[in-house]
Amino acid sequence: MNARLLIQQNASLRHSRKSVASLLVMPSLLFMFGMTGVAHAQSNDCNALGMNFQKRQATIELIQSFNKKPPTAEQACASFTRLVSQTNELMKAIEENGAWCHVPQEILPGLQSQVPQIAEGRKNSCAAADQQRKAKSAPSASPFGGGDSVIGGAVKMPKGAL
């Protein structure tokens, strides 16, 4: 009889362990499924932050390639304008989600220290682009009154008897 009693107690113990385990597992599963929305939001914010870093890095590499192949003033102005915009967006995103996405604390002050240099590059390149636009749109002032680039255009012949 003792053996039967032990078998029944063992079976009831196994059954109670399963029910306790299921009671412990259910809340944890609910918690995990509830947290996937939070984790998903975190991953979206962090992915967006990573994309901002990559876009900015691509623009920096483009600007650094200007040493090998000089750009037009218009291209340089557009690149520096894009870099200013990307830097501002990145600083805002780091302020909002930097701690959440584990961005090192040194990154934001580093970006902030680069802003004046980037703004200066933008100012200079856009000023050069404006000068080029004005030079192209201004009528050529030739002492001979013509539009030919060699001698100032066609020479006007006086009318009347010579």
Image: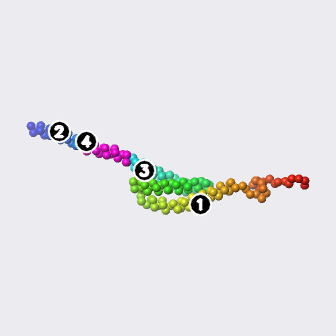
SS at circle 2: helix
Q: Along the horizontal axis of the image, is 114 left or right of 13? A: right
Q: Which x, y percent locates residue 40?
A: 39, 46
Q: Which residue is mark 2?
A: 11
Part of the protein shown in magenta:
21-38
Q: Which residue is mark 1?
A: 124
* Alpha-carbon span between mark 2 and mark 4: 17 Å
Closer mark to the observer between disc 3 and disc 2:
3
Q: Along the horizontal axis of the image, is 19 left or right of 102? A: left
Circles 2 and 4: CB atoms closer than 8 Å: no
Q: Quadrant of residue 136?
A: bottom right
Q: Quadrant of residue 82?
A: bottom right
* Alpha-carbon span between mark 1 and mark 2: 84 Å
* Alpha-carbon span between mark 3 and mark 4: 34 Å
| Crowdedness near tag 2: few (<14), some (14–19) or many (≥20) residues, C-alpha within 10 Å | few
For marks 1 and 2, the one nearer the N-term is 2
Q: Which x, y percent locates residue 47?
A: 44, 49
Q: Is residue 22 magenta?
A: yes
Residue at the spot 81% in from the left edge and 54% down from the top edge? 155
